Amino acid sequence: MNTKCDRAAWLKGPAFKCNVQPAPAKRSYRLVLLGAPGVGKGTQAELLSQQLGACHLSTGDIFRAAKSLTPAERSPAMTAALDFMKRGDLVPDTTVLDIVRERVECLRCPGGFLLDGFPRTAAQAEALEQILTTEKIKLDAVLSYELPIEEIVTRLSGRRTCTKCKAVFHITALPPKQTGICDKCGGPLIQREDDRPESVRVRMQVYEQSTAPLAQFYRQRRLLASVAATGTPEEIVARTLQTLQARG
Ligand code: AMP
């Protein structure tokens, strides 16, 4: 039986209910994951989701899910958002915040949540703080994954993603058994449009300008916990769990 939360309400919007809810946990965690693109946040969010039971809520996944809709099925705001995304630019705050506010039910989920890729600007962080205050929801921590920039560029340019099941490989660090084919479902592997060198450059600049300052925002609120993102994904998740334990 599949026990992994299917995130239908997050990926498709409030008209959809999750068929599989997070399993009841002794303690539910409400976390924000910060870190430059390519630092491995998405992988960590998946592993943490398995360990903690909370759903992995990625705003990037919402936009990628919208890509598979026909243009007629997409709202004009979503069509515009996908153009920003393709270029490696940030989607405007108003669009992102509309999308998150529509999905507030996911923030109320008793299983907790792992926010990945949101907030990404000071305005988004302030808006999230307001939403959480109104909803009387407390963040447990903001995990900031740290890695030297040269390693990030190598990771991003070699990343390959399955078009069907979204599994992530790397041409040297985690190659699939057969080049271009997903080990998990046999689907074709592609380089995400925003992992191409020209988009990666834009994403790194945007990160430095807009998202890096969020560390200070959360440090001031005593929520920031830095985690070294070196080593294998399993080593990093073990380090993350230790960090959470140490915070109590
Ligand atoms: P990610 O998978 O988190 O790297 O997101 C992929 C792309 O989606 C980003 O490069 C942005 O274009 C867009 N995106 C995702 N989340 C946000 C956000 N919170 N604010 C603005 N743009 C976002």
Image: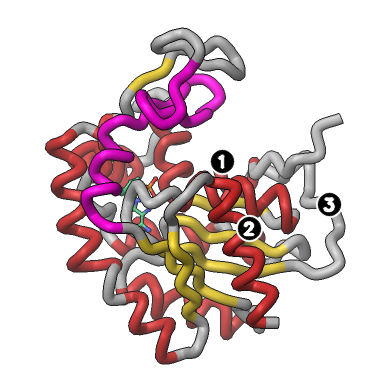
Q: Name the quadrant containing residue 134.
A: bottom right
Q: Which residue is drawn at 28% across and 47% down?
A: 151
Report which residue position mark 1 lands on.
12
Q: Name the quadrant containing residue 205.
A: bottom left
Whether residue 66 is visible here, answered yes or no, is: yes
Q: Which residue is drawn at 71% across and 48% down?
A: 50
Q: Which of 223 and 225 is in front in this view?
A: 225
Quadrant in which the C terminus appears: bottom right
Magenta span: 148-176
Q: Residue at x 86, y 67 (%)?
A: 26
**In magenta segment, residue 156:** yes
**In magenta segment, residue 149:** yes
Q: Measured from the top left, where is residue 79 in percent x and y? A: 30, 38
Q: Which mark's residue is nearer the viewer, 2 or 3?
A: 2
The structure's colour scheme is secondary structure
Q: Say few, some or many: other residues with alpha carbon within 10 Å of mark 3 (under 14 / 14 to 19 / 20 or more).
A: some
Q: Which mark's residue is nearer the viewer, 1 or 2?
A: 2
Q: What residue type is labelled 1?
A: Lys
Q: Say few, some or many: other residues with alpha carbon within 10 Å of mark 2 (under 14 / 14 to 19 / 20 or more).
A: some
Question: Would residue 33 appear left or right of 20 to someone viewing this image?
Answer: left
The mark found on residue 92 in the picture is none
Q: Is the shortest distance between ligand 1 and the CB of mark 1 under 8 Å?
A: no
**Distance of label 2 from label 3 (alpha carbons):** 21 Å
Q: Which of 115 and 97 is in front in this view?
A: 115
Q: What residue type is labelled 3?
A: Ala
Labelled pair 3, 1 in contact (Cβ < 8 Å): no
Q: Which amino acid does label 2 sit on?
A: Ala
Report which residue position mark 2 lands on.
238
Q: Measured from the top left, where is residue 129 in percent x and y? A: 48, 80
Q: Measured from the top left, where is residue 152 in percent x and y? A: 29, 48
**Distance of label 3 from label 1 (alpha carbons):** 21 Å
Report which residue position mark 3 lands on.
23
